Image (cartoon, rainbow, N blue to C red):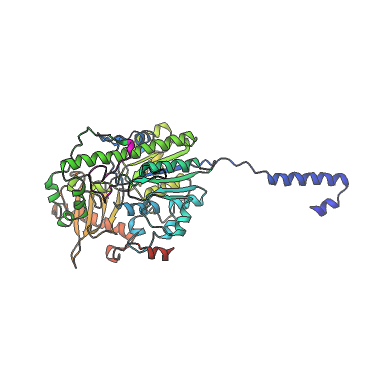
Amino acid sequence: MGTMIKTLDTSARRWALSILVLASAAMLIPTPVKADSRPNILLLYADDQRDHTLGVAGHPIVKTPNIDRLAKAGVRFENAFVSTPTCWVGRACLFTGAYERKHRYRVTPGPLDPELCGSSYFAVLKNAGYRTGHLGKEHVDLATHSADGMFDVRRKLGRNPYFKKQPDGSERHETQILGDWGIEVLKEQPSGQPFCLQLSFNATHAEDKDKRPGIGHFPWPKITDRMYEDQEIPLPPLNDPAIYEAHPEFLKKSINRQRFFWRWDTADKYQTNMRAYFRMISGIDHVVGRLVKQLEKQGLADNTVIIYTADNGYYLGDRGFAGKWTHYEQSLRVPLIIHDPRLPETKQGRVLSHLALNSDLASTMIGLAGLPVPEIHTGRTLEPLLRGEVVTDWRHDFLCEFIAVPRTIPRWEGVRDTRWVYARYFVEGAGKPPFEFLNDLKNDPNQLANLAADNQNAAALNKMRARCDQLIADTGPVMAEIGEHQKSSRKRRRQKE
């Protein structure tokens, strides 16, 4: 350019120089960038909360006005399930968008598979320009490089005790601390950049080391003090001792029964612990309200999709059990609400009956961002259902399983469709065939009769066996090829990192 200018006459040189100066100045002025229109995503993840324990789900006692408002202006899935009903495996399924059979967390040593972490919704969204964050209970070991590729913001909160000592000497409940952190992260959100933020509550998980009823075993935040104090909590619907006695011996001796005596075995203990459990849910609801107000204050509410769900169901004394871990509906069912403020009013407030899975959420969040879903995901995006589209090929069944387990629950695998539930438990013993369950949800919604040995249902049994085999073949190895359960150790984690 300089050589060209020298060859021009004076007036031409002046003209050329002025053009060069303007061009250089233009390069220094940032080009206005249109604000990112992709939605923000806020995922609120409760622990040990069964699907019916929300006001909007028709529960006669528990109060959840803030979550209810999300449902009334959003979409609630009344048939939402987890494929593996336990805390840490459920989180691995959520992160990876895959069945336990595929990620095999804690079946194989070391942290969560780095390849699957790389296709997690956090990693995909982060690579696409989202600011990503996870706050609270992870309960999944992640290699350092995996976490770096997933999170811009990462703050862990130890599971227990629930009340954490603060710098001024006071104590604050884990649920409220998580709300504080969430608001802090929102306040720091850069203008024009979308975010994906997950808050993982430890509530409503019991404090297992403290078996004292109420505030010992289910410590609630002070904001819910005295709630439900004068209300009589109805007994669990399936509280007949004969229901418990009808189970096979390996379930009668399982951790489900052991923990029943920690929580629900006497009338007074049941009433005290149920009130405490409900207070924990209402404590989460209070934080939901705080977060929504913060979004509104910052002008983010109209473009933020809020998802509310939980990691697994909960027995609450039904069948004479506590906990989760099995193929029954009480274990597998969870709440699922997706509030998308961009939906037209005619599409808000709907209750959908489609089978939705925890592994669908990863694909859904990626899809909401307008990105292609990784092929490795076993879930599928719920987006078309949210938009009200008719999806003729939506799933009618899903694989459910429990592989990496303590010795008190045998490994099991099965399939649940819109009518039948099939499960086979691999009870220890050389050459011993699996113990099979077949439940007819149409005629026996409480799953009281095991029809696996009933010749009249042989066709249904064979159909469900074959479907279970097919889903396993499509997903991962058969049970006989899966090694012994191994917990990740600190040494293995360091080696993996």
Residue 230 located left or right of residue 188: left
Q: Main secondary structure of the magenta part?
A: loop
> In x, y percent, where is residue 180?
42, 41
Q: Foreground: 254 or 275?
A: 275
Judge whether residue 114 can be spotted in this image: yes
Give the percent coordinates (x, y) of residue 443: 18, 44
Residue 407 screen position, x and y as percent: 23, 60
Query: In terms of depth relative to the viewer, which is nearer, 496 or 334?
Result: 496
Please report the residue visible at 16 percent of the width from the left and 54 percent of the height from the top: 252
Q: Nearer the viewer, residue 473 or 321?
A: 321
Quadrant of residue 375 in the image?
bottom left
Magenta extent: 206-223
Total labels: the figure holds 0
For the residue pair 216 and 104, the one nearer the viewer reads as: 216
**Quadrant in the picture for residue 235:** top left
Q: Is 280 above or below relative to 466?
A: above
Q: Is residue 463 left or right of residue 377?
A: left
* Up/down of 138 relative to 177, above or below: below
Q: Give me the residue at 31% from left, 56% from top.
A: 471
* Residue 233 pos. (x, y %): 20, 36
Residue 321 visible in image: no
Quadrant in the picture for the C terminus: bottom left
Using residue 172 as the reference point, say whether residue 10 is left or right of it.
right
